[in-house]
Image (cartoon, helix red, strand yellow):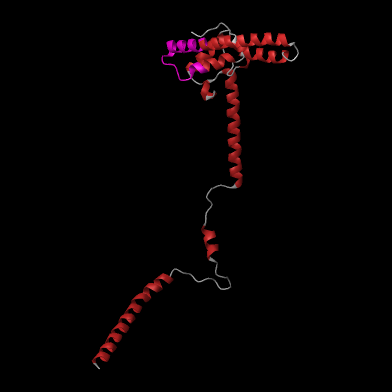
Amino acid sequence: MFRRQKTQTDQHARDRDADAAGHDAAPADDGADAPRKPQPKGHPTPKRRDQVAARKQPLVAGSRAEKQAAKQAQREKMRELRAKQREAMETGDERYLPERDRGAQRRFVRDWVDARTGIAEWMLVVVIVFLFISLIVAEQLRMLMSGVLWAMVLVVLVEAFFVARAARRRVAEKFGEPERGIRFYAIMRTLQIRRLRLPKPQVKRGEHPS
């Protein structure tokens, strides 16, 4: 009997706690539902994916016409830059020259190489002439020309060695410590035909820079 009364007493206590919790939660529920506005009559409730899509904003601002205008402006800018670079190859303007040709030391080396007369600049012409002549001459004459060509190659190698040393020494005398690759730059300039050198020579033959 005592156990039954105790059980009923515990059940009544739990019911009272549940009622109290329900009264406390009711205002919170009302507050959560307050911001929600009812949909107008005659209109279906929008789906969740439609609501999410409506809130999304484009990642890149601007219309398609603005993007095309920006691309066109960029192309015009690059076209102007290439035109200035071509002009710099003719005039030697340092502002628009390629990185490999910029600097006072490299300009000095170009002027020094362009002012001298050497055998190396004719090497390409001799090789092309030899290839054409070797197709029509006799075998003995071809062998003789081949020997002359190899002798010229040896002379060009010796000349390139001395040009590299002289260019480095002159740069050191004028500027102090030479830049890295200055000797290779002088050799490659020496091996090119004078009329085809880029940037174009800015001095005449014999007009050595001071």
Can see residue 203?
Answer: no
Q: Residue furthest right?
A: 136
User: Which residue is pictured at 58% across the width and 36% down the height?
Assistant: 74
Residue 47 lies left or right of residue 149; in this view the side is left
Q: Is residue 68 above or below residue 206?
A: below
Q: Outermost residue toward the front?
A: 140
Taking the spot 51% from the left edge, 16% from the top edge, the residue there is 107
Can residue 11 be seen in the rendering of this structure? yes
Q: Specify the farthest residue to the top.
A: 206
Q: Does residue 19 belong to the magenta stretch?
A: no
Q: Which residues are magenta?
A: 162-184
Looking at the image, which residue is at 60% across and 23% down? 86
Viewer-proximal residue among 138 and 98: 138
Q: Residue 173: within the magenta?
A: yes
Q: Position of residue 116 (x, y in %)?
A: 56, 8
Q: Estimate the x, y position of residue 142 in percent, counting from the top left.
A: 70, 11
Judged from this view, the residue extending furthest toward the left is: 2
Question: Where 56 falls versus 118 (above or below)?
Answer: below
Look at the image and tell me in which quarter the N terminus lies: bottom left
Is 166 positioned to the left or the right of 79 in the image?
left
Q: Residue at x 55, y 12 (%)?
A: 157
x and y percentages locating residue 141 in the rendered image? 71, 8
The percent position of residue 97, horizontal first and vertical second, equals: 54, 23
Closer to the camera in the image, 147 or 184: 147
What secondary structure is the stretch in magenta mostly built from? helix
Q: Is residue 61 above or below residue 181?
A: below
Q: Nearer the viewer, residue 31 or 204?
A: 204
* Quadrant housing residue 68: top right
The quadrant in which residue 120 appears is top right
